[in-house]
Amino acid sequence: MTDQPNLIEMRGVSKHFGDFQALKDVSLDVKLGERVVICGPSGSGKSTLIRCINRLEAHEAGEIVVDGVTLTQSQDSLDKIRGTVGMVFQQFNLFPHLTVLENLTLGPRRVLGLSEDEAKARAMLYLERVQIPDQADKLPRQLSGGQQQRVAIARSLCMEPRIMLFDEPTSALDPEMIAEVLDVMTELATSGMTMIVVTHEMGFARRVADKMVFMDKGEIVEVGTAEDVFTAPKSDRFAAFIKQILNH
């Protein structure tokens, strides 16, 4: 992984919400093909960090470069980066009045200019990949939470991004549905996709992550390989967090 170029570079990034500083001088590199898991207590800045990468939140200080494009207020930089970065949220954010297939073909047709047949073929390819091609004609309300999240992952993949961001993708799911979503994410990770995942699923992190990032109070406290941080965390805060999560 060390010989791969940086796909994301964050330098001194800061972000406030009113008087609350959500990010404090955060710097992070993510290499091509790297799987990064970000963890930390609630309110530590994890979600804000990844939302800044595709400017769902606008950073106030510092620099973010994604796939060679510096993220600014210009629509041009925003369009380029959003064409590169896919995102999966805690909630599925599917259009309830559209079928699964229609949810998946909307972006490729309107944004990428694919024909209806091309978009449908791509949608079915990614529904196969997340193992629910038989759900294509159903409405989201007819699916389980785990199936809806897999549709959300497939929808992002239909835009064929270079980077996938996951913001606690299993936190809204019942326990029995978490494994099916993590299995899909694990398969995606093994395919070489560059991924940043905010999650408390430490088993997934240990199995998949090339790099673990621990955040607390808006700062990156510790960065290391999964093996290093699980067996010998350098900071007391991370050690306490790991112990609390694993004993939960």
Image: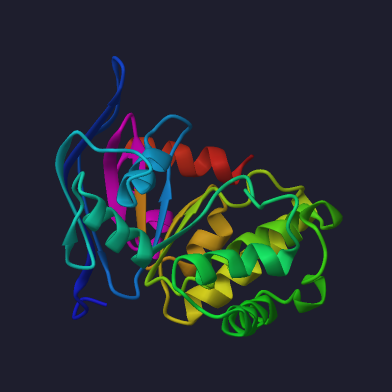
Q: Is residue 33 visible?
A: yes
Between 91 and 36, which is closer to the camera in this rendering?
91
Location of residue 142 in the rendering, given as x and y in whole percent from the top left corner: 86, 56
Q: How many numbered marks, from 0 up?
A: 0
Q: Residue at x 39, y 33 (%)?
A: 44
Q: Classify residue 128 by image quadrant.
A: bottom right
Determine whether 184 is above or below 177 in the image.
Answer: below
Between 180 and 57, which is closer to the camera in this rendering?
57
Q: Quadrant of the C terminus?
A: top right
Location of residue 79 in the rendering, given as x and y in whole percent from the top left corner: 31, 58
Q: Classify residue 112 by image quadrant.
A: bottom left
Q: Which residues are magenta?
A: 214-235
Instruction: Give the residue furthest to the right.
Output: 142
Q: Residue at x 48, y 74 (%)?
A: 189
Q: Is residue 221 magenta?
A: yes
Q: Classify residue 12 by image quadrant.
A: top left
Location of residue 81 in the rendering, given as x and y in whole percent from the top left corner: 30, 60
Q: Residue at x 58, y 52 (%)?
A: 169
Q: Is residue 170 magenta?
A: no
